[in-house]
Amino acid sequence: MFCCLYTNTKIKNYSGTTSQELQKAKEEDKEEEKPTSLTKEDIKAKIDDYNSKVTENGMKLSSDGTYTGFIKVHLKLRRPVTVDSGDGKSPGPGSSSDSSDNRTSFYLPRDAVKQLHISSTTTVGEVIQGLLKKFMVQDNPRKFALYRLTRRDNLFQKLPLSECPLCLRLLAGPDLESLSFVLKENETGEVEWHAFSVPELQNFLIILEKEEKERMRQVELRYAAYREKLLLALGQVESKPG
């Protein structure tokens, strides 16, 4: 197998359809099915087609059937991450440092984009670890997940750790509207608090307290403005004769 693929299984309901409609639906399903592996010749043809559509950062095929190329990953993290500050200096606004171990928690820039050079055998798990290393993030990689985004439909789909992103990039082509990669928090339904260290949890409390105060200030301002409008309207009504 030269290429690992992520096959998206769809469950369809054919009840209430005519025989002609059923046959047409089955033919469409066959067209949607993708092979689980590609031959070396198939990969070469797809790489040639891919490279014909880009002016730089094309893919290169090796003699063993593997290939290398570039992917771009968009960062959409809602929670702060922990980095090793080294000299103890704060990386910027919205940060909270812990002087005991020179670690700092702060928010990464929203919608930041990182380009990675990987091979066709590089897995999602390795991509996540590589991204964290580039940003010097000390958090457990299990806290994060890589998602595929179809921008036309704005649909996010979590990728398994064993998936190979470069293969998905090759199959989708270079068009980012067809496929983009996004790093987000690993949304398992519940926050795995046991995966955080004590300094991280303490930093979260500090940041949450700041956010709470700011949210309360915004609510107070909104209701103060609403109260002022009500008093103005009441004064206008009372001033009318009769």
Image (spheres, grey):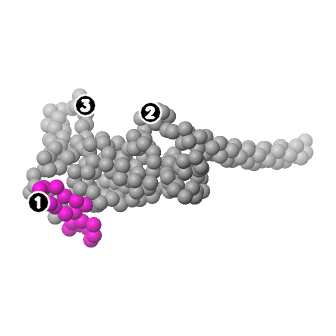
Tell me how far mark 1 sits from mark 3, CA to CA: 44 Å
Q: Which residue, given by chain and number where applicable, does mark 2 sit on?
A: 189
Q: Which residue, given by chain and number where applicable, does mark 3 sit on?
A: 13
Marks 2 and 3 in Cβ contact (< 8 Å): no
Q: Nearer the viewer, residue 241 or 32?
A: 32
SS at badge 2: loop
Marks 1 and 2 in Cβ contact (< 8 Å): no
* Residue 147 x %, y %: 36, 46
- Residue in view at x 25 percent, y 60 percent: 69
Tell me how far mark 1 sits from mark 2, CA to CA: 44 Å
Q: Residues within 10 Å of mark 2 (few under 14, many from 20)?
A: few
Tell me how far mark 2 sits from mark 3, CA to CA: 28 Å
- Residue in view at x 30 percent, y 42 percent: 161
Amino acid bearing label 2: Gly
Sequence-first tag of 2 and 3: 3
Q: In the picture provided, is 203 more to the left or to the right than 29?
A: right
| Magenta span includes 74 | no
Residue 149 makes an appearance in the image? no
Segment tinted magenta in the rendering? 51-69
SS at badge 1: loop
